[in-house]
Amino acid sequence: MAFGRKISLSRVENPCFLLFLIIFQAIFILILYRGSTSGAFQSDSHVPKQLDYSVGEDVYTNLSLFTRLPDNATMPACTSKSSIHVGPLTITFGKLPSERAIIRKNPYVRSGGCYSPPHCQASYKTAVIVPHRNRVRQLRHFLYYLHPFLQRQQLNYCIYLIHQAGSGPFNRAKLLNVGVREALKDDDWDCLLLHNVDLIPRNDYNYYACNENYPKHMVIEIDNLQQSSIFLCSIPHWFFGGVTALTPEHYMKINGLPNTFWDRTGDAEDIAERIRIVGMTALRSVFGRYKKVGSRQASSPDRNFARSAKLHTRKTWKDDGMNSLDFKLLLKKQHPLYTNITVDIGAPPVLLPQDRREGKKT
């Protein structure tokens, strides 16, 4: 034992051995740090635990600090923490911004609604996919707030507006499937951000990037125009809607969303069930507070839809989704603030009287 202790002491006193220990510890700490950020989420250690939403910063605050580097300058990597994060933001819908005003306030947004930081190399690429039909007012507010919100996070992103042609029943889930299909033709996106056009994020710490291992639900609370709130902090596992983030791999693993949900709710419960079926767990963003554009009251998740989804989805998810998607692409055009994709997604099947009695789903 004494001989063993003597060897250990001699090693510690050896300068080369001490240098080796220091290098080893430095490498170990670096690995831990890289591992902690591998999910593409910024550290929350610098974020105050109590956030005051009664006061907030303008979403364009300090955005002018992001300026283009000289042409001969080497583009550095973006830092993991944006220098202009403020947390709660002020969101108002009193005045409808013009498209020209939005373009003027976002000089680095390229045609198609795409952006990459002018001052650093983004480490993450997000495609924002928005189902839409005839909601011009909501879309204008959405673009006014979301472009600077994403720029504050130093993301490389594009906004895709998936417009349903015709006057038939609206099908949000199928439009999202179309958006994913078309967006992945354009780029190898790290994250698919599925976003309702009438929800505006109120906290720039709500990072619009995916987790590599888990689908993420971005919404925990929604405020409507009357300042009343629907608190969703304890969102049940059977709800996954509004604003969600999935990697392309996650999206294909669950076979996307159902194509058969026409003009009705329930797709959020269906995708939650798909996530559960394939053995994944959804994360919830702790900063996911949103404001709703429009006077229609937001509704809480309905447990009845969850029960229906559990029974229905298990039978249909393998055959109803990305692998059964059919549509006609009518137009794909780059606008200054978004890429417009107009599609004909068909119409729901006509139920026979006996089908209605049996309660079959379209």
Image (tube, helix red, strand yellow):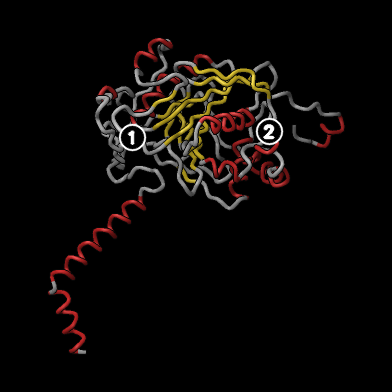
Depth check: give the residue in front, 247 or 13: 13
Q: How far across and how far down the image is residue 44, in percent?
A: 32, 44
Q: How far across and how far down the image is residue 118, in percent?
A: 31, 27
Q: How far across and how far down the image is residue 215, in percent?
A: 51, 44
Disc 2 marks a residue whose amino acid type is: Leu
State left or right for residue 202 relative to residue 71. Answer: right
Mark 2 crowdedness (10 Å alpha carbons): few <14, some 14-19, many ≥20: some
Q: Which residue was labeled with disc 1? A: 121
Depth check: give the residue in front, 113 or 224: 113
Tell me where residue 72 sits by quadrant. top left
Lower sequence index among marks 1 and 2:
1
For the C terminus, the quadrant is: top right
Q: How far across and how far down the image is residue 231, in percent?
A: 47, 36
Q: Which residue was labeled with disc 2? A: 325
- In this rendering, the count of numbered labels is 2
State left or right for residue 122 relative to residue 329. Answer: left
Depth check: give the residue in front, 237 or 33: 33
Residue at x 69%, y 47% (from the top left corner) = 314
Query: Is 36 drawn above or below residue 261 in the view shown?
Result: below
State left or right for residue 320 relative to residue 183. Answer: right
Disc 1 marks a residue whose amino acid type is: Gln
Tell me where residue 248 sits by quadrant. top right
Query: Is 199 drawn above or below residue 271 in the view shown?
Result: above
Secondary element at tag 2: loop
Q: Residue furthest front?
A: 72
Q: Single out the mark in the foreground, 1 or 2.
A: 1
Q: Give the label on residue 66, or none.
A: none
For the N terminus, the quadrant is: bottom left
Query: Is 337 drawn above or below residue 249 in the view shown?
Result: above
